[in-house]
Amino acid sequence: MNADAHWQKAHELEGTIGFLMSDPQKERHLASIVEDVYGAAQNLIAYALQTRHGTHLDTHAGVARLLREQGHGEIADFSANSTDYAWGAGTAAKETGR
């Protein structure tokens, strides 16, 4: 996927997040919202790596390492930890019936 496609995908997901958040019973969409936030963040990371450094990965594996190599340690930490948060929220939502 090229940089512009990553940018567009992130903003599509942002629109979906806004739609789901507008539901008065948004708690029932918790897993989808968390996964969409995660997806949007990953697409924005890919966009930034491609436009600033001329490279990105089309898979999530190795993104944290690539970010560190490019001098983006704080974002690398987010990327490395966000998978756990996304999966954890999805599991919590399923367990609570949301």
Image (cartoon, grey):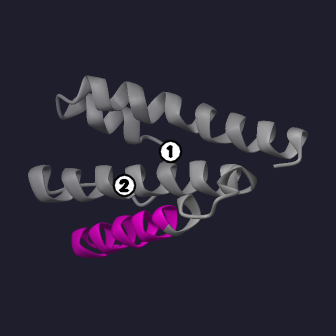
Mark 1, secondary structure of its residue = loop
Mark 2 → mark 1, Cα distance in angstroms: 8 Å
Give the tally of numbered discs: 2
Q: Locate residue 7 relative to residue 70 in the image: left or right.
A: right
Mark 2 burial class by Cα count in 10 Å: few <14, some 14-19, many 20+: some
In the picture shown, does residue 81 fall above or below 5?
above
Q: Position of residue 17 (x, y in %)?
A: 50, 61
The quarter of the picture where the N terminus appears is bottom left
Q: Locate residue 30 relative to residue 65 in the image: left or right.
A: right
What span is colored magenta in the figure? 1-18
40 and 45: which is toward the camera = 40
Q: Residue at x 47, y 30 (%)?
A: 80
Residue type marked 2: Leu
Q: Residue at x 70, y 57 (%)?
A: 25
Residue 12 image-quadrant placement: bottom left
Q: Locate residue 41 relative to residue 27 in the image: left or right.
A: left
In the picture shown, does residue 83 fall above or below 59?
above
Which mark identifies residue 57? 2
Was residue 25 drawn as part of the magenta stretch in this picture? no
Q: Residue at x 39, y 34 (%)?
A: 64
Q: Main secondary structure of the magenta part?
A: helix
Residue underneath mark 1: 61
Q: Are marks 2 and 1 in contact (CB under 8 Å)?
A: yes
Q: Position of residue 53 (x, y in %)?
A: 12, 50
Q: Residue at x 27, y 73 (%)?
A: 2
